[in-house]
Amino acid sequence: MIKLSTLGTLSTLNTLSTYKNNMLIVYYLIVINILSAFVFYTDKRNAVRKRYRVPETTLHLLELFGGIFCILLLMYGLHHKNRKISYFFVSYLILIAWISLFLYLIYFPIL
């Protein structure tokens, strides 16, 4: 027979584990957004200087991995890639996918 105090401890451990997992996700998103911002800024700087550009595929992959939030802010802050319809369209599709994922995880949590 399991004591009630043991169940309370298990519940606390589960909550701590969930908190740690959530914090890992937050740290990952912070790192990927900083990396995406650096790559996007480098592409803008290279565009102004007429140098080698970062391929759009690379930028979209960074967006897909979670860097979409910073890149969208920089798109308008740096006035970079915001007039190119194909880039704009794909970026907003990725944003919709990320928002859908967040909403799904809020309403249907895994744990």
Image (cartoon, rainbow, N blue to C red):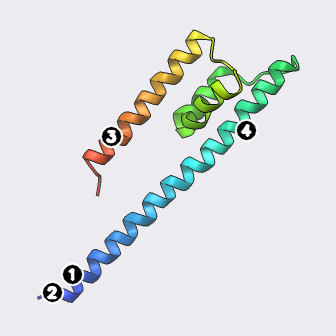
Q: Position of residue 95 (x, y in %)?
A: 47, 29
Q: Say left or right for 47 vs 104.
A: right
Q: Earlier in the sequence, mark 4 or mark 2?
A: 2
Residue type at mark 2? Answer: Ile
Q: Earlier in the sequence, mark 3 or mark 4?
A: 4
Disc 2, disc 1: CB below 8 Å? yes
- Residue positioned 37% across, 64% down in the render: 18
- CA gap, disc 4 to disc 1? 47 Å
Front residue of this view, candidates 15 and 75? 75
Tell me, for residue 7, which label it has, or none.
Answer: 1
- Would you name the residue on which mark 4 appears? 38
Disc 3, disc 2: CB below 8 Å? no
- Would you name the residue on which mark 3 appears? 103
- Would you name the residue on which mark 2 appears? 2
Q: Earlier in the sequence, mark 1 or mark 3?
A: 1
Determine crowd level at label 2: few under 14, some 14-19, many 20+ residues with C-alpha closer than 10 A. Answer: few
Q: Nearer the viewer, mark 2 or mark 1?
A: 1
Residue type at mark 3? Answer: Leu
Determine crowd level at label 3: few under 14, some 14-19, many 20+ residues with C-alpha closer than 10 A. Answer: few
Q: Nearer the viewer, mark 3 or mark 2?
A: 3
Residue type at mark 1? Answer: Leu
As helix, strand or loop, the secondary structure at mark 2 comes to loop
